[in-house]
């Protein structure tokens, strides 16, 4: 079933063209992710589909039998409503049936009671209230009597997300769900729950996200918006990157050919031909088309930086026995850590666990209750916080950066101009000379990030840097940080970003406990999963081994270790037989993937590889469980 058809859409703001003559279709069951740098028109396209904006030209046809639902960054709500009341403002027949059913519980009108019961049955609303509360619970919203006006910005967005998912569930009809950065303000557990929910749900989805693991798990189609065009890719994020690279290579070859032709035709043009004949006029027109291609700017993420970083001394940063509490809530308890030169540390944990507090303590913005901090004399912090950028409304982007310095130093004695550095972070020449007030929200985040990096600190501290950043900017930032020679602390819920950058994890596990883990984020999560599985199987948390003189004899009343049942013995034999076969199958698929270039086949093989890997992981876990018996 076709949901949306768009033909030749064009949209501009003044002289800036966002997209030109783009066409696409959305069909039932599609799960689509939009990838583009900020300012390319993602939000505008979503607003056009919602009917909140009108395209300059082209047509959008939305099937009359579907509803379009949007999860936006800006949430409209009455601060006096409780969370429960806000959830019940949903405009749907199942919700209305649920409201009437609650009223009927206090009514003596038999006709009203009967109608309420019939409506609950007709609209399949019996389980809706429980599902609504389960969704809220998964998003860590439990006090439904709290007023919306008392919630933090992140909590408001989580309640709005729960309302949207409930609305989609309640309608029982064809729905196009549009989500703009739904993972912002969610911790890792919430992101993984939402990822699983959307993957299993039978919905049609159009998604804007910077979370690449989330994108890969949920979506199988990627729309790339770039240079006023829309490119469609079937498959994973890796497939999109491969397709993009091939397209850019082809474009480079086309530009080289155009340059050769341009030089020849330029000589002819300089002889000032008079366009009196159709033939000469046609050649002049062709010249200008060739010139346009020849002068195409392909400088995107192409700069390689060899930094001249401010010198780091022997002493970097050391925290000794730090305690910090707010009332009865303990955030840090006897925490000690010594940061090393060039170390890249990721900080993870649930919202409110104390991650941002630790960052503020390190920089002296917040006092601690007990302990000591020693900071090296040569340390220069660069802090990217969630508070946003301070600027003058009419100040131009280029002037704002030049206030720091005209040039950024490189280790080889050379330097980059402010304009070149801006271009590295995807600000084209036109945007550089625009007022900051005209930038989109994402572009302002990108400028804030660049402003921090341009000051050339040797110790970077990032608090949720990936929120509202587009994927192209994240790629540039990751490349920058991988080359960065100083020390780095990152607080982030972006699993892909953390895996690429950090080599050490400090995990806030509650009650002031911070676990020190050597490895990236995925390795930490795997370690936690193994601990959870062991705890589930043994019924207790693993404890450190204590030295003993001799093991005590088991008492006569101690429970004996049970033997495997016949069924479990057969299951173990089957697993031990099939695991090598699955490993061989996985190896063959990986070999095929390494030699395959066809996009459709790559996508199919990737899906097969994922299925086999999941099955093998299930067998391995079950094998361990049976071995314990």
Image (spheres, rainbow, N blue to C red):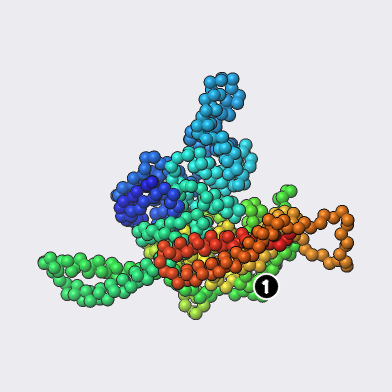
Q: Would residue 602 be visible to someone looking at this image?
A: yes
Residue 240 image point, x, y percent = 43, 63
Residue displayed at 34% across by 69% down: 251
Left or right position of 612 against 174:
right
Residue 64 image offset from top left, x and y in percent? 37, 40
Going 53% across and 20% down the picture, which residue do you hit? 111
Residue drawn at 15 percent across, 71 percent down: 273
> Residue 498 sits in which quadrant?
bottom right
Above or below for 146 versus 462: above
Q: Position of residue 107 (x, y in %)?
A: 59, 22
Determine whether 466 is above or below 412 in the image. Answer: above
- The foreground one among 39 and 578 is 578
Q: Which residue is mark 1?
A: 315
- Indicate left or right for 393 with 133 as reference: left
Residue 350 position (above or below residue 240) = above
Residue at (49, 63) in percent of width and height: 606
Element at label 1: loop
């Amino acid at each position: 079933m076709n949901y949306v058809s768009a033909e030749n859409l064009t949209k501009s703001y003044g002289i800036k063209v966002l997209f030109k003559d783009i066409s696409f279709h959305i069909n039932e069951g599609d799960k689509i992710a939009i990838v583009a740098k900020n300012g390319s028109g993602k939000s505008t396209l979503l607003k056009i589909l919602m009917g909140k904006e009108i395209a300059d030209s082209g047509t959008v046809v939305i099937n009359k039998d579907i509803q379009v639902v949007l999860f936006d960054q800006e949430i409209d709500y009455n601060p006096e409503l409780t969370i429960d009341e806000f959830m019940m403002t949903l405009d749907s027949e199942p919700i209305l049936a649920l409201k009437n059913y609650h009223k009927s519980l206090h009514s003596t009108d038999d006709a009203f009671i009967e109608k309420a019961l019939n409506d609950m049955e007709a609209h399949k609303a019996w389980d809706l209230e429980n599902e609504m509360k389960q969704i809220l619970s998964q998003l860590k919203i439990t006090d439904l009597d709290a007023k919306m006006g008392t919630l933090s910005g992140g909590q408001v967005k989580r309640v709005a997300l729960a309302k949207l998912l409930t609305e989609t569930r309640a309608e029982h009809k064809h729905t196009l769900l549009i989500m703009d950065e739904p993972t912002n303000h969610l911790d890792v557990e919430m992101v993984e729950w939402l990822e699983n929910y959307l993957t299993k749900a039978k919905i049609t989805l159009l998604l804007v996200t910077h979370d690449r693991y989330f994108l890969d798990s949920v979506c199988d189609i990627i729309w790339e918006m770039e240079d006023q065009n829309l490119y469609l890719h079937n498959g994973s994020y890796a497939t999109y990157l491969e397709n993009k690279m091939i397209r850019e290579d082809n474009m480079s070859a086309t530009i080289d050919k155009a340059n050769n032709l341009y030089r020849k035709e330029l000589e002819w043009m300089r002889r000032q031909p008079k366009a009196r004949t159709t033939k000469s006029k046609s050649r002049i027109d062709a010249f200008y088309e060739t010139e346009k291609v020849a002068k195409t700017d392909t400088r995107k993420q192409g700069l390689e930086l060899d930094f001249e970083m401010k010198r780091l001394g022997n002493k970097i940063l050391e925290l000794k026995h730090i305690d910090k509490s707010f009332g009865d809530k303990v955030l840090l308890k006897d925490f000690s850590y010594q940061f090393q030169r060039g170390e890249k540390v990721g900080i993870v944990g649930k919202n409110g666990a104390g991650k941002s507090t630790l960052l503020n303590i390190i920089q002296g913005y917040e006092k601690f209750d007990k302990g000591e901090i020693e900071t090296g004399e040569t340390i220069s912090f660069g802090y990217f916080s969630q508070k946003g950028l301070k600027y003058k409304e009419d100040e131009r982007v280029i002037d704002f950066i030049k206030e720091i310095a005209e040039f950024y130093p490189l280790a080889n004695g050379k330097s980059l101009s402010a304009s070149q550095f801006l271009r590295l972070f995807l600000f084209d020449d036109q945007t550089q000379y625009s007022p900051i007030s005209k930038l989109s929200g994402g572009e302002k985040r990108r400028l804030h990030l660049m402003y921090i990096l341009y000051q050339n600190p040797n110790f970077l501290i990032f608090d949720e840097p990936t929120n509202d950043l587009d994927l192209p900017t994240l790629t540039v930032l990751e490349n920058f940080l991988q080359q960065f020679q100083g020390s780095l602390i990152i607080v982030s819920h972006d699993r892909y970003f953390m895996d690429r950058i950090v080599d050490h994890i400090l995990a806030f596990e509650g009650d002031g406990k911070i676990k020190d883990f050597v490895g990236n984020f995925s390795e930490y999560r795997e370690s936690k999963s193994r601990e959870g599985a062991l705890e589930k199987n043994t019924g207790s948390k693993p404890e450190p081994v204590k030295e003993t003189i001799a093991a005590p004899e088991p008492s006569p009343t101690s429970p004996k270790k049970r033997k495997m049942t016949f069924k479990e013995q057969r299951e173990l034999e089957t697993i031990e037989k099939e695991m090598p076969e699955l490993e061989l199958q996985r190896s063959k698929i990986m070999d095929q993937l390494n030699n395959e270039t066809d996009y459709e086949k790559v996508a199919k093989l990737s899906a097969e590889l994922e299925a086999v890997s999941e099955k093998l992981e299930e067998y391995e876990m079950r094998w361990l469980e049976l071995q314990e018996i």
